[in-house]
Amino acid sequence: MIYAITIYGEPGVFEALPKDRQNEVMSGHSALQSALSERGEFVSMKLMPPTSAVMVEPAPTEGSAPLITDGPFAETKENFLGFYAAEFKDLDEALEYAKMISSPVARLEVRPVAWAGGVISSV
Amino acid sequence: MSDWLEVTFTLHRPRALAALIRMFRDIDIAEEAFADACLKALIVWTNDGEPRDPLAWLLTTARNSGLDHVRKSQRRAAILSRHVEEFKPVPAETPDPDEMRDDVLRLLFICCHPELERRDQIAIALRVVLGLSVDEIASGFLIKPKTMEQRITRAKKKIASNPVAFETPSPAERGARLGEVSLMVYLMFSEGWSTSAGPKQIKFTLCEEAIRLARLLAALFPAMGEQAALLALLLFQHARRRARIDPEGKLVALDDQDRSLWDRANIAEATGLLQKAHRTGHQGVYIIQAAIAATHAHAASVDHTDWASIESHYAALYALQPTPVVRLNQIAAQAKLHGPIYALKAMEPLAQELSTYRWYHAMRGGLLQEAGDHHAAIAAFETVMTHRPTTPERVVITERIKISQESLRGM
């Protein structure tokens, strides 16, 4: 079963941390990434800060075009920051791996996902 | 744990201070009230965990603490008579986003007091809005903490004597404030990027703090192309920080930088922001400058740089900002397209206006060297030396002089 480990937190917190704290958080991520790559394929994505986002809202009336807006986004509220996805034996195993990136800057959600297709080569 | 809490306080400080200054109309009271709320948070949050809405918690606590202070202080009568309605109990909610936006803009605008020197405007913004200590700010500006303390105290007094309109600004006023504040943020970054004098060329904190403020503006004004572009511009520049100084501490010109050292994450974010800015259809100085920076950022090398597009961006910038320095930059791009002789001729009309601008002479020296006129090149580089270059610049110019001298000897 593919599980996604999704990361939620306040944007900007990581950037504002002192360097040694940043390294602490990053070492968790590098540990997870090397552990995941040893056991097979995985994807991980980090979303850029919400200021770079544009919203596509549903069309206001039937037949009209979707509404594209530039925000505003509640920057200080909890935000979707990024995710990992990989094949895990079961939920317990996924949770074990998720623990590797647990830190006070992020809340993690572990949830099974259905693969919907597509291929992305590493950038 | 306190490290994480400190970060939360730092992140919420601009918004909290902005709201508190609207309530109390006094920077000192607002600062004290916020510091007090953080102290309480340190105790309460460590025991009970962080509240669901930290900003609302901090604001409520700070407001109560500020009210206590006002009641006890002698200023009570004067302040109470001025805006009694401000003293109603606060609901524990984050203020309305529109109101918050005007609050933060007002706070930044207060820092841009016209009677303050630009460096003092920057210093006061670092102190009040971002909460840096006087020592940190002093080290950023390479001056003694004592001197910085005096400057900040004087600046605060000037600000206090000049009331800023507290009612909701009209769209035109809001636009003017935003322009003034954006310029201050841009100059804060420039100050950090290249100080006019001193042994240390790059002061990362000033650049990083300017980026923080630019982020704040871009978040508060998501539909404004110029503010997204300002953030993009600063990120494009900041991406080059590691390539700009070599291991011996020597300044490396853009042309000679190892581009693999450029920060790809910064460039990617800036690229996304610039595309968003272009979508607004706005045109402005930051959008154009960010487009120039993007052209450099995406070129694999100097030779692969799209100089024609850079040249046309500078032409557009000159239409908005007809200054000799912009024109000089346009000519620098023309030099890449049409060669040094063409550029040297194009520079001539600027000689008078830019006679004390050391980059004019440095660029002229470089072009003369390229054209093989080493006597004139040496003279131009020597002129640079008389206009107080920074120590890293001095090293670069001395080297350029040596190259021309060696060429002459070889002939």
Image: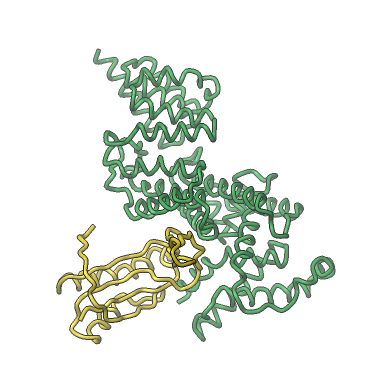
Chain colours: A yellow, B green
Q: How many marks?
A: 0
Relative horizontal placement of residue B102, taking residue B86 as reference (left or right) = left
x 51%, y 38%: residue? B196
Relative horizontal placement of residue A116, taking residue B139 as reference (left or right) = left
**Which quarter of the picture shows residue A37?**
bottom left
| Residue farthest along the front direction in this orientation | A63
Q: Is residue B250 above or below residue B265?
A: above
x 52%, y 32%: residue? B319
Residue B186 point in image, percent of width and height? 52, 46
Residue B97 point in image, percent of width and height? 59, 67
Q: Is residue A55 above or below residue B353?
A: below
Q: Is residue B396 above or below residue B63?
A: above
Q: Is residue B31 above or below residue B334?
A: below
Give B337 or B109, whichever is nearer the viewer.
B337
Give B261 or B92, whichever is nearer the viewer.
B92
Which quarter of the rendering shows the N terminus of chain A? bottom left
Residue B88 point in image, percent of width and height? 74, 77
Give B114 or B296, whichever is nearer the viewer.
B296
Residue A24 point in image, percent of width and height? 34, 70
Give B310 or B282, whichever is nearer the viewer.
B282
| Residue farthest along the top direction in this orientation | B411
x 68%, y 54%: residue? B170
Which quarter of the rendering shows the C terminus of chain A? bottom left
x 59%, y 73%: residue? B94
**Which quarter of the picture shows residue B128?**
bottom right
